[in-house]
């Protein structure tokens, strides 16, 4: 049996769902088929735009069939793609089913980089199934070890209650994947603070130790309890210390995921650095009529000096949206037409750590600038942390923690690259409304 659709998407994650929805928005009369390994797909809701680029949204999951019913020509097929025959424009599923396409977009996402593969006491958190497994394991656990220093690890440290958490970091400051040591120190003061929620916090007081000396760093974040005589798992750190735990959470990032999807497509170019599928500025791979978006791909175009890839949900959404527009342009043979996407001009990401709004703009940690740049800081303990990075008098990046209301102005300054040399002494002056100053 052969199923035909002009647009076929592999993957029901953020990039795949966004791509499918945009295709239906642009071409509602053209069938779109999403091939998903899971009956659940990721949904985006409650989208709020804060600047031209910066937006915040919530991610949820729903049954793929229910989601597809919201669109006139969208269908979801549950299955695994084992092979893509680029010559015949055919995707082969493990079930034996064949899917013929005009344009194909690979949005198969990423998989956690686990410390130990297939270990019964080592978990990675990435999708609904892994989250449910984590929650089930927590019910009977008294101590876990958390390895990683990114967003997932930081959120777990903040949210987990009533259980010992040994947080193991390779860096000398917390949340180093996103913020600098100064911001890490700002967050450190919030570990024992009540949660920033309207409800009464029941969070236990924590004890942090060894934060400047251990490599990798270990921090004991929990009320001290009676130790078990034996633990299901023992972990030895490079500092020589050994800890027992019920299980270990490996939150050390992701790698592009396409184990079988493209194993026999020899023309497909893959990045030697991160094994992502290489795409050009129109999200095209090296295989004709095959596109890619999200965590599975690696941008191979000449990038803007103020943008880089971090494999975040925000970027997956941006890439999925852009890929859909490019697929339509290719489908309509709009040769020479380049879809511009403003989102790739400046890196922009909004999240929340320890109850604080966190905005990252441009080269927020001076990425690629070496040591030849200037840093402006404004810090109010427990309220805000503002960092601006300037090079040759121009804003190159910023970290905004708290309700600073600076994101729109800073984004505009990044986009227009205005010389701020005459104004830099007042750039972070809290008594000056810089939004009006640069209006």
Image (cartoon, rainbow, N blue to C red):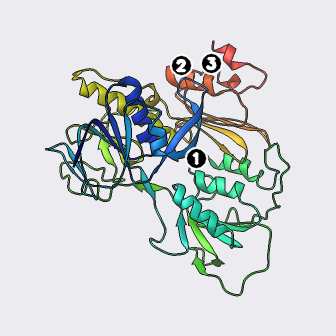
Which image quadrant is residue 153 in?
Answer: bottom right
How far apart are the alpha carbons under marks 3 and 2? Answer: 11 Å
- Locate the C terminus and report the quarter of the image it occupies: top right
Q: In this view, does 317 lie above or below 335?
A: below
* Residue on which disc 3 sits: 422
How far apart are the alpha carbons under marks 1 and 2? Answer: 26 Å
- Residue 315 vs residue 270: left or right? right
**Residue that appears at 60% across and 64% down:** 134
Please state which of residues 215 and 82 is positioned toward the viewer in this rendering.
82
Which image quadrant is residue 162 in?
Answer: bottom right
* Residue on which disc 1 sits: 178
Instruction: Look at the image and tell me whether residue 282 can be seen.
Output: yes
Please state which of residues 408 and 215 is positioned toward the viewer in this rendering.
408
* Residue on which disc 2 sits: 418
Looking at the image, the residue that sits furthest to the right is: 200
Q: Is mark 2 on a helix, strand or loop?
A: loop
Looking at the image, the residue that sits furthest to the top is: 439
How far apart are the alpha carbons under marks 3 and 1? Answer: 30 Å
Please state which of residues 424 and 335 is positioned toward the viewer in this rendering.
335
């Amino acid at each position: 049996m052969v199923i035909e659709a002009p647009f076929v998407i592999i993957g029901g994650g953020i990039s795949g769902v966004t791509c499918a929805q945009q295709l239906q928005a642009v071409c509602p009369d053209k069938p779109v088929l999403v091939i998903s390994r899971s009956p659940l797909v990721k949904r985006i809701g409650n989208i709020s735009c804060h600047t031209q680029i910066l937006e915040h949204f919530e991610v949820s999951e729903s049954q793929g069939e229910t989601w597809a019913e919201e669109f006139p020509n969208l269908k979801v097929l549950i299955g695994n793609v084992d092979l893509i025959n680029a010559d015949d424009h055919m995707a082969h599923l493990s079930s034996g089913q064949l899917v013929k396409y005009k344009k194909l977009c690979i949005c198969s996402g990423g998989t956690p980089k686990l410390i130990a593969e297939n270990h019964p006491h080592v978990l990675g958190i990435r999708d609904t199934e892994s989250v449910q497994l984590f929650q089930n394991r927590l019910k009977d656990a008294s101590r876990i070890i958390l390895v990683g220093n990114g967003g997932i690890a930081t959120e777990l440290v903040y949210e987990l209650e009533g259980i010992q958490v040994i947080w193991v970091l390779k860096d000398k400051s917390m949340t180093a994947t996103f913020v600098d040591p100064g911001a890490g120190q700002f967050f450190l003061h919030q570990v024992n603070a009540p949660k920033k929620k309207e409800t009464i916090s029941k969070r236990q007081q924590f004890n942090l130790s060894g934060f400047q000396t251990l490599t990798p760093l270990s921090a004991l974040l929990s009320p001290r309890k009676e130790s078990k005589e034996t633990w299901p798992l023992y972990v030895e750190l490079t500092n020589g210390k050994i800890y027992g735990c019920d299980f270990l959470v490996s939150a050390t990032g992701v790698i592009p995921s396409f184990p079988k999807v493209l194993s026999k497509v020899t023309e497909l170019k893959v990045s030697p650095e991160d094994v992502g599928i290489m795409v050009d500025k129109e999200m095209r791979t090296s295989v004709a009529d095959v596109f890619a978006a999200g965590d599975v791909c690696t941008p191979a175009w000449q990038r803007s000096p103020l943008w880089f890839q971090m494999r975040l949900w925000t970027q997956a959404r941006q890439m999925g949206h852009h890929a859909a527009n490019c697929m339509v342009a290719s489908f309509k043979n709009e040769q020479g037409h380049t879809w511009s996407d403003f989102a790739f001009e400046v890196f922009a990401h909004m999240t929340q750590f320890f109850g604080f709004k966190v905005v990252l703009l441009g080269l927020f940690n001076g990425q690629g600038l070496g040591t030849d740049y200037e840093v402006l800081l404004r810090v109010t303990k427990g309220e805000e942390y503002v960092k601006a990075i300037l090079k040759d008098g121009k804003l190159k990046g910023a970290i905004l923690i708290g309700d600073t209301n600076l994101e729109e102005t800073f984004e505009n300054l990044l986009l227009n690259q205005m010389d701020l040399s005459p104004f830099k002494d007042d750039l972070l002056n809290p008594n000056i409304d810089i939004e009006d100053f640069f209006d």
